[in-house]
Amino acid sequence: MTSQSREPHTPEALRAVVVGVLNSFEHPTLKRNLTAIKALHHVAQLDGKLHIELVMPFAWTSAFEELKAQTSSELLRLTGTRAIDWRLNHDIATLKRVKGQSGVKGVKNIVAVSSGKGGVGKSSTAVNMALALAAEGARVGILDADIYGPSVPTMLGTENERPTSPDGTHMAPIMAHGLATNSIGYLVTDDNAMVWRGPMASKALMQLLNETLWPELDYLVLDMPPGTGDIQLTLAQNVPVTGALVVTTPQDIALIDARKGLVMFEKVNVPVLGIVENMSIHICSNCGFHEPIFGTGGAEKLAEDYGTRLLAQLPLHINLREDLDDGEPTVIRRPESEFTALYRQLAGRVAAQLYWQGDVIPDDIAFRAI
Ligand SMILES: Nc1ncnc2c1ncn2[C@@H]1O[C@H](COP(=O)(O)OP(=O)(O)OP(=O)(O)O)[C@@H](O)[C@H]1O
């Protein structure tokens, strides 16, 4: 019997066939199958075409492409259809925040990006990951809380912009490459920022978070100040974060500080989503040679020791630095590059980890009034 000669399915039978195939799809972002998270929204067969619509509670575009590639031929065969109209929508879940705190108006989930020491590529990772989360289908913002070196405006090419205040009290975020952003760097000059210490800096950062008129955001990436001192501890305690990432390089000295970062989050009960190893391998821009100049295996071991996971290993490459210096991060400038694929994989893993690690709270829960 050819596939074209099959009897048309009843809606229930069709759904059962589709569910069977979709549930066989395994992916690192899925701890349970698609039916278990009620992702299959709509199935229909119209004019010989199969329509499948998924609604996902976390950013999932790259995995969706893999799903299509892996299951389409089987679905066509089993349903006797000639084409599939695939649709993916997102209805990103709001997850419980540390200490059950209420959230920031407009913001569903806050992801803190931290590092035990400066210069390991925390801001580079935060910016490219935020852009990658947006490419994965989410509405994303980034708040640069790095008072020691607010580099996000330069990396996004917005260093000469200043937030406006539509009501004289709150700030409108600056939009860049689709991200809603605000930064301590828009408000103070570099020289001023350096003299901020302790409570003054924490207070300013909390104000920046709460007094920005964020649009509806699924994820707000928080670029933390580097280190594990009082300011970082105060922020980790007071910002209603959902989870945190620790960025490190493979050098022993950076790993020792990354360990302190993990301990700090543990102390204030902030769930650690995982570790990002930046500058894992140097890729020569002339010959493409891969060289682990800072050593290997350290971040993996650190993740193991602390019962967390290594979410990404990002290479050291001149393009990544140049793109950021030009205000056009690699995820935007080179969307088809292997680097962008790595950042998107990281974004997908972070979004999934947040979801699986947390408790979903209903969307109508009250946000903190600003
Ligand atoms: N993987 C990479 N490949 C090439 N250059 C990189 C990479 N990661 C970061 N850089 C470059 O290294 C420098 C430091 O990076 P970045 O500002 O992100 O570090 P940081 O940890 O946020 O530092 P700080 O906390 O002190 O602000 C930047 O010039 C950045 O472009």
Image (spheres, rainbow, N blue to C red):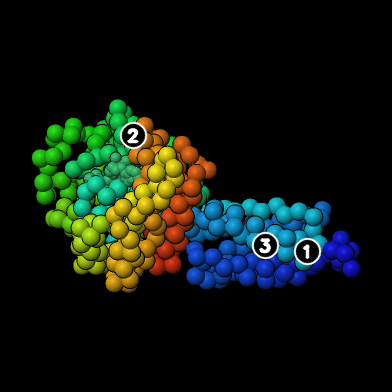
Q: Nearer the viewer, residue 92 or 267?
A: 267
| Label 3, label 2: how far apart the Cα atoms are | 41 Å
Residue 316 x, y percent position in the rendering: 36, 47
Mark 3, residue position:
71
Q: Is mark 2 within 8 Å of ligand 1?
A: yes
Q: Nearer the viewer, residue 327 or 196?
A: 327
Report the disc number at residue 325.
2
> As shown in the figure, which amino acid type bears the numbered disc 2?
Asp
> As shown in the figure, which amino acid type bears the numbered disc 3?
Thr
Report the disc number at residue 77.
1
Question: Is 232 located above or below residue 163 in the figure?
Answer: below
Residue 363 x, y percent position in the rendering: 44, 58
Q: Earlier in the sequence, mark 3 or mark 1?
A: 3
Which residue shows up at 67% across the image and 68% down it? 21
Q: Is 165 situated left or right of 198 in this image?
A: right
Which residue shows up at 73% across the image and 63% down it? 75
Q: Secondary structure at mark 1?
A: helix
Quadrant containing ligand 1 reads top left
Q: Secondary structure at mark 3?
A: helix
Which residue shows up at 18% across the image and 34% down it? 190
